[in-house]
Amino acid sequence: MTEPLPVPSRDPAAAPADDPAARKAMWRTRLLAARRAVAPADAAVAAEAARDHLLAALPPAPDAVVAGYWPMRGELDPRPVLTALRARGHPVALPVTPPPGAAPVLEFRLWDGDPAGLAAGPFKTRQPPVTAPAATPTWIVAPLLGFDRRGTRLGYGGGYYDRHLSGAGVVAIGYAFACQEVPLAAGGLPVEPHDIPLAAVVTETEVIRPQQTLADPGVTGGPD
């Protein structure tokens, strides 16, 4: 379904070990290209497969307030799993992205599942209007550009999710195509002090529980 990572013009592993920002920038270029190479038909099948993996292995607690995202730039589509979780009675929220130049702090607002009710946001996002009720998610399906099996998440570099992923009692689940994995054999992703490990990563092929797991991830269910 997904192809191996393309050979980059510059190897991220060749960047200086003491310059994690440079290594992250190289990985972003490589991983964005890999994600964009996924065919639309394969992406649709992957979204349904990832939904099934998540629901089978990582169902949120009954009282969880779930947050997802509106897919853009080829991201794995979380809408199938958000629809399923809403049907199970979970409130579902989407992020509201601040305008360019503002502090990189996301707000979350409830979404009833109707795409027509969403407003245009910065960076070609779609988001709930300001009239939608605010929400404090406890269980976040997080977009990403790359991940490794330690639970390291590589985002776009804006820092929008950092505050929420570090919140007390928040379970953060990375959602991505399998081709977005950075193998530990290649050194994995660089880790900086502000990086928050994910509780798990869900792809179209498997559920990955990090080798360095959280003491109490707050996730129910067994192996997929």
Image: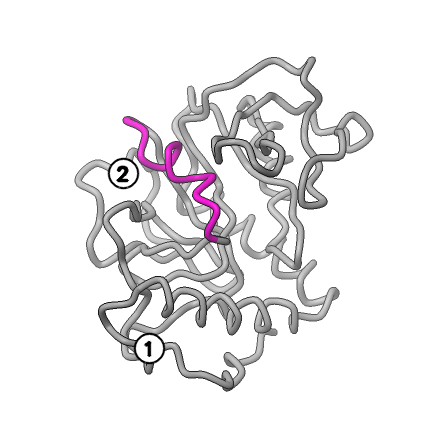
Look at the picture and state if 189 lies above or below 127.
Answer: below
Element under disc 2: loop
Question: Is 55 placed left or right of 76 in the picture?
Answer: left
Q: Residues within 10 Å of mark 2 (few under 14, many from 20)?
A: some
For the N terminus, give its image quadrant. bottom right
Q: Position of residue 19 (x, y in %)?
A: 29, 67
Residue 186 position within the rendered picture, expressed as x and y whole percent measured from the top left: 31, 79
Left/right placement of residue 159 relative to residue 47 reads left
Q: Residue at x 67, y 39 (%)?
A: 122
Q: Could you tell me which residue is drawn at 34 percent across and 47 percent down? A: 198
Query: Is residue 121 placed above or below 77 in the rendered structure?
Result: above
Main secondary-structure element of the magenta-colored stretch: loop
Give the percent coordinates (x, y) of residue 165: 37, 37
In the picture, the disc for residue 217 is 2
The label shown at residue 15 is 1
Figure check: 43 above or below 64: below
As shown in the figure, which amino acid type bears the numbered disc 2?
A: Pro
Query: Magenta segment, which residues?
Result: 157-169
Residue 122 versus residue 134: which sits nearer the camera?
A: 122
Towards the viewer: 173 or 13: 13
Furthest-right residue in view?
Answer: 116
Quadrant location of the C terminus in the rendered image: bottom left
Residue 31, image x, y percentages: 51, 69
